[in-house]
Image (cartoon, grey):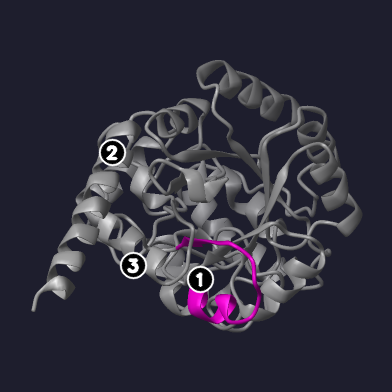
Amino acid sequence: MFHTLAVPVIAAPMAGGPSTPELVAAVNEAGGFGFLAAGYVTVEQLAEKITRTSELTAKPFGVNLFVPGTRPTSDISSYVRRVTACAEKVGAALGDPRWDDDNYAAKLELVLALRVPVVSFTFGLPDADDVQRLKAAGSTIVVTVTTPSEARQARQIGADVLCVQGSDAGGHRGTFADDGISPGGGELYGTLAAIRLVKSTVDLPVIATGGLVSGADVAAVLAAGAVAAQLGTAFLGCPEAGTNATQREALAEGARRTALTRAFSGRPARGLVNRFLIEHGPHAPAAYPNVHHLTRPVRATGEVEVMSLWAGTTYPLATAEPAGAVVRRIGAELTETIKSLAQRFSRG
């Protein structure tokens, strides 16, 4: 499916608001492929998004599900005390630091019933039996991986395609298990290195993601063996995206560095550095989604210094133009890059 795209660009699923039916449809109509994010929405809301997307575009699209992990064993009471003062400063009450599975089973049944063309999984592996059920319903299965070991595991349960996530990616790391120690929850590979290592390990099509914003970036990952490039940060400034206004402003300023942190959710994620990340990141436990629920009311205040401002390392290069224009521009840049390389190596 992905190797036949007119423009080998995929709009990444971005939970928390940015991924909208309008964004998915605009990317699709421009020759790319879009994903809806099922994370953090109810089953009813997800059904509405799928229905709306189907109304806006007749082309196939995907839905991404968060695979629930085990209940964390970390004691987060000290972290609760630590962030209490921050919540009070912005006039917010802390949320209930509970564990839940994001209604995973019900969302899985929904995408099965609606025969969503592509279903992708992040944070772990779906059950092999569920993979077969989805395939029987006509769905292509994509699993997000960050290491060769995860790629092997994904192949074993029947994944059709791997989304290989490099360490430059914005938002949550797709690691199956957070080691609770290293900043990224495990070994970090740049996007190109990750593609090469995974391609040498398993014989499956791969989508590349992490720090990709231009046609030259897409050309690089295609040359490394990817069938398409998945971009998230590149679409955050688009008018069709549901990106928070405060985050849009911070991205447009382009003045902050990025860092990996567990401060906001209890799982490693890359975002713009602000006061909350600096003060609480070093102390945040590996306790997802408990920490996510704990800090959610604080983040919802819209105060830039306490929000989770997810972004990849190359975010200053992203533009605030319509999604279709982004896809077409990247397609043109990709063509120009390929022509330039062909001319360079055909001389003499």
The answer to which of marks 3 and 2 sits earlier in the sequence is 3
Q: Secondary structure at mark 2?
A: helix
Left or right, 122 with respect to 188, comes to right
Q: Check the picture and name the quadrant holding the N terminus.
A: top right
Residue 90 position within the rendered picture, expressed as x and y whole percent measured from the top left: 46, 46
Q: Label 1 amino acid?
A: Gly
Q: Label 3 amino acid?
A: Ala
Could you tell me which residue is drawn at 41 percent across and 68 percent down?
168
Left or right, 90 with respect to 288, comes to left
* Residue 278, above or below 68: below
Left or right, 10 with respect to 84, comes to left
- Of circles 3 and 1, the one toward us is 3
Distance between the alpha carbons at the discs numbered 3 and 1: 33 Å
The answer to which of marks 3 and 1 sits earlier in the sequence is 3
The label shown at residue 220 is 3
Could you tell me which residue is drawn at 64 percent across and 66 percent down?
204
Near mark 2 (Cα within 10 A), the count class, few <14, some 14-19 or many ≥20, is some
Q: Label 2 amino acid?
A: Arg
Distance between the alpha carbons at the discs numbered 3 and 2: 18 Å
* Residue 345, above or below 107: below
Near mark 1 (Cα within 10 A), the count class, few <14, some 14-19 or many ≥20, is many
> Label 1 belongs to which residue?
281
Q: Check the picture and name the quadrant holding the C terminus.
A: bottom left
Residue 277 position within the rendered picture, expressed as x and y whole percent measured from the top left: 45, 65
* Residue range (magenta): 194-209
Tag 3–tag 1 contact (CB < 8 Å): no
The answer to whether residue 303 of the structure is visible from this angle is yes
Q: Judge by depth and name the residue closer to the eye, 163 or 69.
A: 163
Q: Secondary structure at mark 3?
A: helix
